[in-house]
Amino acid sequence: MAPRLQLEKAAWRWTETVPPEAVAQEHIEAAYRVGLEPCQRGACRRNCRGNPNCLVGIGEHVWLGEIDENSFHNIDDPNCERRKKNAFVGLTNLGATCYVNTFLQMWFLNLELRQALYLCPSTSMAGEGIPKDKDYEPQSICEHLQYLFALLQNSKRRYIDPSGFVKALGLDTGQQQDAQEFSKLFMSLLEDTLSKQKNPDVRNIVQKQFCGEYAYVTVCNQCGRESKLVSKFYELELNIQGHKQLTDCITEFLKEEKLEGDNRYFCETCQSKQNATRKIRLLSLPCTLNLQLMRFVFDRQTGHKKKLNTYIGFSELLDMEPFMEQKNGVYVYELSAVLIHRGVSAYSGHYIAHVKDPQTGEWYKFNDEDIEKMEGKKLQLGIEEDLAFLQELVERDNSKFEEWCNEMAEMRKQSVARGKIKHEEVKELYKRLPAEAGSPYDFISLEWLQKWLDESTPPKPIDNTACLCSHGKLHPDKISIMKRISEYVADFFYRRYGGGPRLNVKALCKDCVVERCRILRLKNRLNEDYKTVTNLLKITVKGNDGFWVGKASLRSWRQLALEQLNEQDEDTEHSNGKMNGNTQNKGNESNEEKREEEEELNFNEDIVCPHGGLCISENERRVVSKEAWEKLKQYFPKAPEFPNNKECCSQCKILEREGEENEALHKMMASEQKTSLQNLFHDKCRPCLGSWPQETDELYIVSQFFVEEWRKFVRRPTRCSPVSSVGNSALLCPHGGLMFTYASMTKEDSKLIALIWPSEWERIQKLFVVDHVIKITRTPAPGADPEGALYTSEPQLCPECREGLLCQQQRDLREYTQATIYIHKVVDNKKVMKDAAPELNVSSSEAEEEREENKPEGEQDPDFNQTNGGTKRQKISHQSYIPYQKQGIRRSTRHRKVRGEKALLVSANQTLKELKIQIMHAFSVAPFDQNLSIDGKMLSDDTATLGSLGVIPESVILLKADEPIADYAAMDDVMQVCMPEEGFKGTGLLGH
């Protein structure tokens, strides 16, 4: 089939010879493409959108070939969830709980631990048992572990859900935790729980299986005195850097350390610091020896943890006798499990476990729900444990699982049966779907037909409202998304699914076809008229036999005409929106916006002034001949008409003269004010309250904002309005009192005020309206000592309002969020100020003003040279200076950052520890090496908030870093507490 655009042109080709008044039924059917040949299967690679009779490629292939019964349902085979014979049971990963699952599998395969847990009495055993109509809910960690182990042993499921156990521990399923830390904490919790049991085999199982003893032994080199500190351990943490064998790591763990120099040992016998040696001696080993390989270390250069991929070799047997203090026993261990971290990063990855079945000696890989046998003999799971009431719970769960499997199988069976019926129905309807020539037919949307053929989405009622034209019939432009089907199938669809309105042969809109015919013929004539008008514009018009036309309108008149011709069709298309129930409001809104744009682009309105007359700028218009104007009027009958003898707008002429007069007046005012107040304009020879000038005993105050606005006007009088009022009310409270003290005006509030000499004040009173006079008077003390002078202000300070203002400012400083502070690193307790270049402290608005000042005069004013009748649009009225509100006083308190400083975004409620972590990332200084101070006060409480420590926006905190330490393991321990993201460690476990 031909492409859609070719089909579009062919459907309307008859309009070239048929005028609108001669449109007949055959032309209407041609426009709706009723007579196009239907496509045959195999001939089209995809559906032909331009042919309503093409019913190929709409989803029918799923129903016409051989049907797989599995396509009739989306239910997986429940037997896929069934545990295979002699296979282990997996555990569901709840998000980021792989580290929990791996440990659970290893603990489950520790037969001694499993048996001891089964012997723990349950609260459910003490009573009448668990009712059969009620689900079992473990009440303790021990009961959760019992139930999980029982399910892992005898469940029929391929994997079980450990969410009850995880929830009981209070773990965040979306947060990856440290596997080693989890093992330590859980063993401690389990040991504490079992310590309350009466049965010693249960009470001591954790110590017996996992707990050993070693001693920190320190020997004085002077007197030979030996001090020993005995400690329990549940795992040995081994450094792997620089080693290739597991035995080398153990040797380093037990090696002797020399205590010399500043690290000397205080000997109780010698009563002084002496050189000494220190080492770890292994006293006893547990049945199961856990060895922790420290693959994750802290990288001082990056301030982050990193993973060591060092190869460490170990055999399946480990003889620990050479490492024991007393070598009078057998200490040979057999490898029983290895916990592995997959991933290159210390902050992400996945845990799996390789565990040996203690009964068969075969190895298995446990990966959450998936379990893979690695090699070895046939697996025979032991069932020798006495599960007591736990077996009943497992059988209940297995019964639920069997019921679920049966329900799923029945649902699959029913879905298949319904699918077969639907299959035969669709095949029959699709055969009768095409409308034969001369037979009754209906139009229906392609989208609805596709949904009918898509089993995954049940069809909704047919909704044809979105494809209707303004006359309530089928819009010709919608034919590309419609399909013509037989009346028989259409009757079936409307009976089964409902909806409407039906679009049969009576729904073909003659009015739309006639209008489209008219538009197409006008478009064809437009090209010829464009050439005619172009030639007419070349003729010089003499006398008054012409018309004014905007140059912009002439450049785009053909485009404007096309848009005007398409306006009605576009409006209809926008208002209809999309098919099948989408709202029409959005289309209406966009239509209104477009209409507004078009109103701005109406032909010849570019030479209409704001008063509705002819604009006075002849550069924007030209005269065209009467013949050219008549051609243009055919397309734009409502365009404003101006004969070439038409006078320009008289009001615009008056405004032009007034604008020129005002511009001259403003320039004169600016020059006069600048001459009168030269020092104030150039900010020269200004008085200062910090060192009162001796030549006067009184000074006047105005707001700095007034001075800045006045300077703007003097610099750019043609752009800025003159300032008429001083506006000192902004410096006063509602009671008329001054908001600033003398001391504050010499310090933090000095940027809000400007000091005025008495001589300047006299000139200001003549040039501006003075709403309030603010004066500071100095009364010299006896002996004319300046230090003892008394300073008073008129009006006087309002203490109540001043105190409220200060309280509000302090409150604001304590409740900030995302504010900037600066961290300055110091060396030898001195700021690194050498060669420190302060950054430009210019706000964005100030910088913009500087750029504006450097522009040529004509470019500075955005209203300058914007022609409308040749008038420079300027602000003609004299605007009074409007004082700013007190709440809006802009304080220029930006800190000037120097080299060596870094800016951080902080909030008042974050802790000092969180700030130290930010500093670590910025300066690569570990938190425990940071000494922070502000205004001479040390910041040491890591749990305190920044607001409580007096850290406010723009504060500068000094950072002094301690010398780096060489003990990376110590730094790693600290980072376990400080880092917000949890690290990961690989773990190797050895079984005895």
Image (spheres, rainbow, N blue to C red):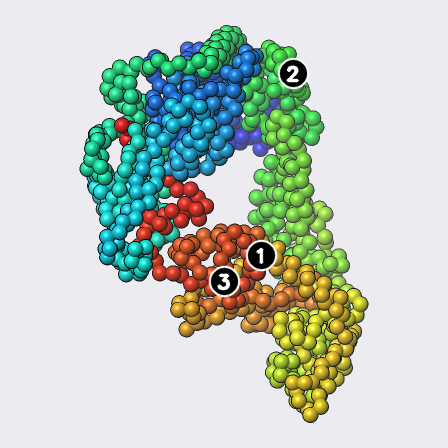
In percent of width and height, residue 457 lies at 54, 20
The CA span between labels 1 and 2 is 69 Å
Judged from the image, the secondary structure of the residue bearing numbered disc 1 is loop
Observer-side mark, 1 or 2, equals 1
Observer-side mark, 3 or 2, equals 3
Q: Residue at the far right: name it.
A: 735
Above/below status of 183 relative to 975: above
Marks 2 and 1: in contact by CB < 8 Å?
A: no
Identify the residue at image location x=38%, y=28%: 204
Considering only order in the chain, which callout, 3 or 1, is on the residue closer to the N terminus? 3
* Residue designated by label 3: 938
Say what amino acid the circle numbered 2 marks.
Gly
* Residue designated by label 1: 948
* Residue designated by label 2: 498
In this rendered view, identify the residue nearer to me: 460 or 232. 232
In this rendered view, identify the residue nearer to me: 282 or 639. 282
The CA span between labels 1 and 3 is 13 Å
In this rendered view, identify the residue nearer to me: 101 or 796. 101
Describe residue 864's horizontal placement relative to residue 365 as left or right.
right
Above/below status of 978 relative to 483: below
Judged from the image, the secondary structure of the residue bearing numbered disc 2 is loop
In this rendered view, identify the residue nearer to me: 755 or 174. 174
Question: Would you call the spot at circle 2 few (<14 residues within 10 Å), some (14-19), or many (20 or more)?
Answer: some
In percent of width and height, residue 830 lies at 43, 70
Say what amino acid the circle numbered 3 marks.
Met
Instruction: Name the image quarter holding the C terminus.
Output: top left
Above/below status of 335 relative to 794: above
Residue 785 picture quarter: bottom right
Say what amino acid the circle numbered 1 marks.
Ser
Judged from the image, the secondary structure of the residue bearing numbered disc 3 is strand
Identify the residue at image location x=45%, y=25%: 197
Marks 2 and 3: in contact by CB < 8 Å?
A: no
